[in-house]
Amino acid sequence: MASNKSYEQPRPSIPANVRRSVEVESGHCCAIKGCGEHTYLEIHHIDQNRDHNNQENLILLCDKHHKMAHADIIDRKALRQYKELLVDSHATLIARKFEELKALIIQEKAEVPEPEPSRVQPPDDRVVKQAANRADILNFALYHVAIAHFENEHRIYFEHQVQFSQGDTSLKLDALRQDDDLPEDVVLDVHYLRKPYMDAPAYGPWLAKKLEIYELLTGRPARGVLIVVVGRERMLEGSYLDMTRQGVESCGGTVTLQVYSCEQVGFHPGAISASMFASNLKKENASDEGHDG
């Protein structure tokens, strides 16, 4: 009787983020295996305590199965088993999306040669030299200068270097704006295309896959902005970024493209490796010596 009386009280509201997560977890369908109903869906409290709004106590049911749950035709133990199936399935789906993203990145990066690090070590074997990859450091600086430029241009500010983790997997985002006043969250992904040969269709699908994983992890809808910074002004015009644009177009409107030059954002990484920079200095010195002679 106490349970029936509690259902006569005004229904406490389920927080929007919790409701969204329950719906995403169930794929916006009834959680009863084989039902597949995606209209007239209601969130059911498994323990029938309407004040217990933790996600693990909530399950999405169609009108028919919701009535069956309240009549104990589908009992709490069965509902918890259905919930466990959903959680396992959701985790498996996230893991699969991570693998798909990893495969996309590996496939594309295999075609781009990595710069060679400096091999010069101190003469004393007991001293160990360590240095961050020059290209990584300069690209990191460029990415966040570009994000700051985008922020100032659009008057909207982002969290930088955001990471979501679940178990052994993690999703890293260059920048994120989570805002309940916006229709959807905004994810920024930045790429530096130093030369025209780096134009590729993969960058848009990479971001689209990140959006899929983000929505599965958070239950929040999101759109992506691919920020491409080009190393040469002429790459802003003509067909230099045709493949990148095609990749963005293939994402079905979930990703848009913003292109800047290094000059526009106010930072240029310069030489890609320290060894190239050293070689340039040697050439300049040799040239000066020859001129003096």
Image: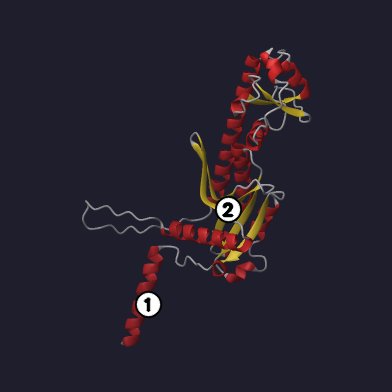
The image quarter containing residue 116 is bottom left
Q: Residues within 10 Å of mark 2 (few under 14, many from 20)?
A: many
**Can see residue 159?**
yes
Which colour scheme appears in the figure? secondary structure
The image quarter containing residue 91 is top right
Please tell me which residue lies in front, 170 or 111. Answer: 170
Q: Residues within 10 Å of mark 1 (few under 14, many from 20)?
A: few
Please tell me which residue lies in front, 155 or 50. Answer: 50
Amino acid type, label 2: Asp
Side (left or right) of 64 relative to 137: right
Side (left or right) of 271 relative to 255: left
In the image, what residue occupies the spot 35% across and 56% down? 131
Secondary structure beneath label 1: helix
The circle drawn on residue 189 is: 2
Q: Which quadrant, please, contains the C terminus?
A: bottom left
Secondary structure beneath label 2: strand
Amino acid type, label 1: Glu
In the image, what residue occupies the spot 48% across and 56% down? 113
- Residue 99: give x, y in percent of width and height: 56, 39
What is the CA distance from the residue labelled 2 to the residue labelled 1? 38 Å
Find disc 1 in the rendering and name its residue.
284
Figure check: 38 above or below 230 = above
- Residue 107: give x, y in percent of width and height: 56, 47
- Residue 87: give x, y in percent of width and height: 60, 27
The image quarter containing residue 225 is bottom right
Q: Which quadrant, please, contains the N terminus?
A: top right
The count of marks equals 2
In the image, what residue occupies the spot 71% across and 16% down? 4
